[in-house]
Amino acid sequence: QLPLFSSSFRWCSRQRRVFQWRQRRKCNRTVVVGASGASSSSSSEEEKDEEAKRLVFNPAAMYNEIFCDDKTFSKDVSRKIAKEVTELRPETYRYPEDSFYGEIDVNSMLELIDLGTDGKNLDGGLRYVDLGCGVGKQVATAALSGKFAKADGVEICPDLAAKAIEGIARLREKLEKYSDSSHACEISVSQGDVFDQDLSQFDFIFVHATTFHDTTVGMLKAKLSREMKVGARLAIVSKLCDDIVNFKPLQSIPGGIGWKPISQVDEKWQLDCYLYEKTKELD
């Protein structure tokens, strides 16, 4: 499996020093953070090299090392786990269709995050959640995007949730090495049912709902309409939510069309992702 991060970074300042990945670039770029100044003349070249390695903040390398280099996090392995759980413990999911495992290309996810947070005050401490997060790759992407103060994931399958918790713990350990506050993001993944979660605390909600059963989608729409706070954003894959009366398509998408095609991992075809904003509370 090729690393998901094959494109480079473009670094920018928006309210504070943050970074964001950009698609269609040819090489990876790293930035040195928290450098303490020139080394003393007595420092050896080896010590200088080790110090440089310690100070280089390279989110692409972090992501790839955890989720790409370790094959136990691959999409094929994760899909096999979900299939086995469906067969051996069918009570885990409401409907078998809800268990199908898919992954969004990381650069497409970063574009969604850019669009979904457009116009939001990043200094306000935005909070992200992935409902049905699998092994946590989109949660990690959100945490590394520089857009959120907290990134959460919820996964009903205990086996996938365990892998997500493992991966996020490894990412958290890597991030703790950097004292620069621009890289700070609290990260959490839990095993549980998305319908037991309080959605009122989140600013950006992501749902990969491509194969969700119609009943599950209807229940989810009602919960989102009822619990999301006004101004919060929803990115939902493959399912239109135009029938939610207190939602409107997100206008920050070029053309104001409210949706964009997104790429999948190891798949040739794209999926449609619909972005909405909650505009009001229901009477």
Image (spheres, helix red, strand yellow):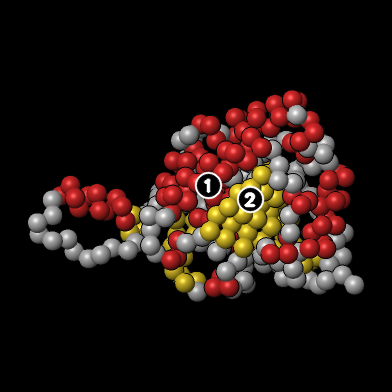
Label drawn at residue 97: none
Disc 1 target residue: 168
Please, which residue is most extreme toward the right here? 283
Residue at disc 2, secondary structure? strand
Residue at disc 1, secondary structure? helix
Disc 2 target residue: 153
Describe residue 200's horizontal placement relative to residue 73 as left or right.
Answer: right
Residue 117 place in picture, x, y as percent: 62, 65
Report crowding for label 2: few under 14, some 14 to 19, many 20 or more residues within 10 A (C-alpha): many
Give the answer, above or below, for where 5 lies relative to 180. Answer: above
Answer whether residue 111 is visible to the viewer in this image.
no
Describe residue 26's horizontal placement relative to residue 155 as left or right.
Answer: left
Depth order, front residue of 73/251: 73
Q: Please give the name of the residue rendered at 78% of the width and 51% of the height, measured from the top-left corner.
A: 195
Residue 94 place in picture, x, y as percent: 82, 39
Q: Please give the name of the residue rendered at 9% of the width and 59% of the height, measured from the top-left corner.
A: 41
Describe residue 247's horizontal placement relative to residue 10 as left or right.
Answer: right
Measure the alpha-carbon separation of dots 2 and 1. 10 Å
Describe residue 269's horizontal placement relative to residue 42 as left or right.
Answer: right
Answer whether residue 234 is visible to the viewer in this image.
yes
Q: Please give the name of the residue rendered at 24% of the width and 49% of the height, measured from the top-left corner.
A: 50
Q: Please give the name of the residue rendered at 62% of the width and 63% of the height, measured from the top-left corner.
A: 127
Kind of residue at disc 1: Ile
Rendered image quadrant of residue 119: bottom right
Kind of residue at disc 2: Gly
Residue 159 place in picture, x, y as percent: 64, 34
Report crowding for label 1: few under 14, some 14 to 19, many 20 or more residues within 10 A (C-alpha): many
Give the answer, above or below, for where 118 lies relative to 113. Answer: below
Depth order, front residue of 125/138: 125
Residue 144 place in picture, x, y as percent: 50, 55
Q: Are marks 2 and 1 in contact (CB under 8 Å)?
A: yes
Q: Earlier in the sequence, mark 2 or mark 1?
A: 2
